[in-house]
Amino acid sequence: MSFSTLLADTWRRHDSLVCVGLDPEPGRLPASLGGGPGAIGTFCRAIVDATADRVCAYKPQIAHFAAQRAEDQLEALIAYIHERHPGIPVILDAKRGDIGSTAQHYAAEAFDRYGADAVTLNPYLGRDSAQPFLDRADKGVILLCRTSNPGARDFQDLLVDGRPLYQHVAETIATQWNGHGNCALVTGATWPEEIAAVRALVGDLPLLVPGVGAQGGDVEAVVGNGATANGTGLLISSSRAILYASNGEDFAEAARAATEALRTTINRYRPAA
């Protein structure tokens, strides 16, 4: 089943636009889990089991695993999600972007080694750097557009032919790169007006929106500016506010409560399907 089909189905089944970012920080894990890569795997599986019926996707961040020599835990985690909670798409947050055979290897890493359903990419090197990913019609290709970090304006807001560069990125990807219908864009929650501008340019293209929770993005503004007419179109990502809702033995239960609270808040502002 393709990423776009998985996502649409999970939006409907779980009535949720919440994407949980799996960004394990060893220093913040509950002491009861011990240490080392094994603790990372145990922590993430517990979070997944506690929240699986309240999310539309999971988004493990590759650097949080690789820095701890826990790539095998990442592989096992994605396989675990697919086996224990089938139908929930997994986005590998890798922000890859390179040319030629290197891009082909990165695509194989994301989709064949890790088994991800989608991957985040940096489009700065142009279409040829994304082509090996775009060619995988069953996989999602989620490209950076207007990101949530303060430095995003350094380049993304530069005017090109009278419009900010990020708007050219959005339009080009929606109209020229999306031949297989497998593209999506990253638009940060801290810039709701820019989300509205992107939505106007790309139609119903899915938007992955980080920046709510710990980064302070406003849920009402995100939904109001980014949801499609049927009340979907968004993957609103939260990591730290969910993962570290408690540092005690009740961490999984607290993560579920935080996920449910975010889901309820998002659904309050969604247009009726």
Image (cartoon, rainbow, N blue to C red):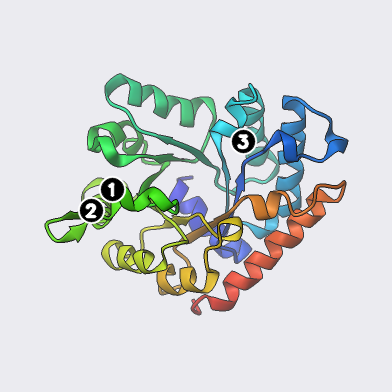
Q: Quick one: SS at disc 3?
A: helix
Q: CA distance from mark 1 to mark 3?
A: 34 Å
Q: Quick one: SS at disc 2?
A: loop
Q: Quick one: SS at disc 1?
A: helix
Amino acid of disc 3: Ile
Question: In the rendered view, would you say 201 is above or below 45?
Answer: below
| Residue 183 shows in this picture | no
- Is residue 7 found left or right of 49 in the rendered image? left
Query: In which quarter of the view is residue 106 placed?
Result: top left
Query: Of tags 1 and 3, which is closer to the observer?
Result: 1
- Is residue 245 found left or right of 216 in the rendered image? right
Residue to which mark 2 is pinned = 158
Which residue shows up at 37% across the image and 69% down it? Answer: 193
State the residue in front, 242 or 171.
242
Amino acid of disc 2: Leu
**Residue found at the far left of this picture:** 161
Q: Earlier in the sequence, mark 1 or mark 3?
A: 3
Q: Position of residue 3 (x, y in %)?
A: 46, 47
